Image (cartoon, helix red, strand yellow):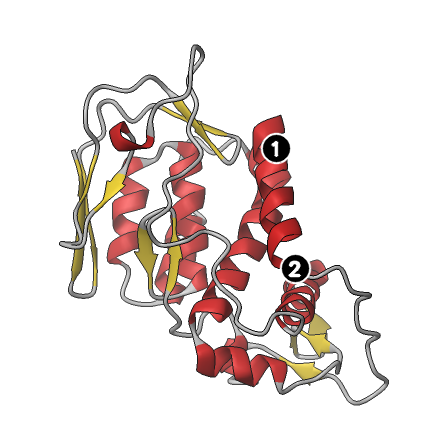
Amino acid sequence: ISTEGKQAIHDVYANSIAAEPSKQISNEAPINVYAGTNDNANLSNFATRNVDYYGFQYDSVEKAFQHIKALSAGDHKAMGDIMHAKTPQEARKLGRNVRGLNVEEWDKISTSILKELMYNSFAENENARNELLATGNRPITHKYNGVEQDNGRFSRLLMEVRDELSKIKTPSPTIKKTETAPIKTESAPIKTESSLNYKDSGRSTLSGKPNPVVINGITLDLSEIGIQFQLGEQQMEAL
């Protein structure tokens, strides 16, 4: 991840999260969150929960995460397929077959991106946020057949997000709906007017012929992309 990317992530959380000591995890019985067994599935990344990220709108954290993974790899076909996926499970399956992914680089930034998506999804959805906060400081697990999944990453991030949200009276997404991605070129920053512009009509257009850009440390060449995305009734088109 670039220096600018690290600073952006730092600034986002420094500005939105009060500097208070983290809650101590209680000794109460843990709460397991696992969509496959319907254990508190409303809190999982597979739950239907709107999330906005740099102008893209998704109906689940899982779809958002897999789409950004495909975006980082420059796999345009996978990007479109994932946006058309009818379920988060289908999006995950498609994400496992992304082509051209630099696994080493993706591993460096994927956890930060996932946490930001999780945070935004709860910040934007009051009912889900209240359900998460109602768990207090009980430990959260992500177990299937008694075995913790994802090396404990999901459960750790969910507890971190819960802790951060509990300190904010009226949380807002770390990436606002109208905010464009931090974009730079090798020479000078591109003005936001000429970068990806998200319109109320649901169409996202790329004006001009920009140089390769860096978004969250991911270098992308957007000059020749021609993909149509569809999410439910919402359509977005990048030309």
The one nearer the camera, 205 or 220, is 205
Task: Give whichever of discs 2 and 1 has the lower sequence position.
Answer: 2
As displayed, is residue 28 above or below residue 237?
below
Q: Is residue 24 visible?
A: yes
Asked whether, in this view, residue 149 is left or right of residue 38, the answer is right
Q: CA distance from mark 2 to mark 1?
A: 30 Å
The answer to whether residue 143 is above or below residue 173 is below
Where is residue 104 shown, x and y percent of the image? 61, 33
Q: Which residue is mark 1?
A: 104
In the image, what residue type sits under mark 1?
A: Glu
Which residue in the rendered view is the most extreme toward the top? 187
Secondary element type, mark 2: loop
Rendered image quadrant of residue 51 = bottom left
- Give left or right: position of 56 versus 230: right
Q: Residue at x 31, y 57 (%)?
A: 57
| Residue 239 spot, x, y in % from top left | 16, 33
Q: Residues within 10 Å of mark 1 (few under 14, many from 20)?
A: few
What label does residue 180 carry, if any? none
Q: In the structure shown, which secondary structural element does the residue marked by tag 1 occupy?
A: helix
Q: Which labelled disc corresponds to residue 17?
A: 2
Judge by depth and name the residue closer to the eye, 123 or 98.
Answer: 123
Query: Residue 132 location, x and y as percent?
Result: 58, 80
* Nearer-the-camera pick, 137 or 83: 137
Residue 13: x %, y % from top left: 63, 52
Q: Quadrant of residue 72?
A: top left
Q: Nearer the viewer, mark 2 or mark 1?
A: 2
- Quadrant, the N terminus: top right
- Identified at 67% across, 68% down, the residue is 155
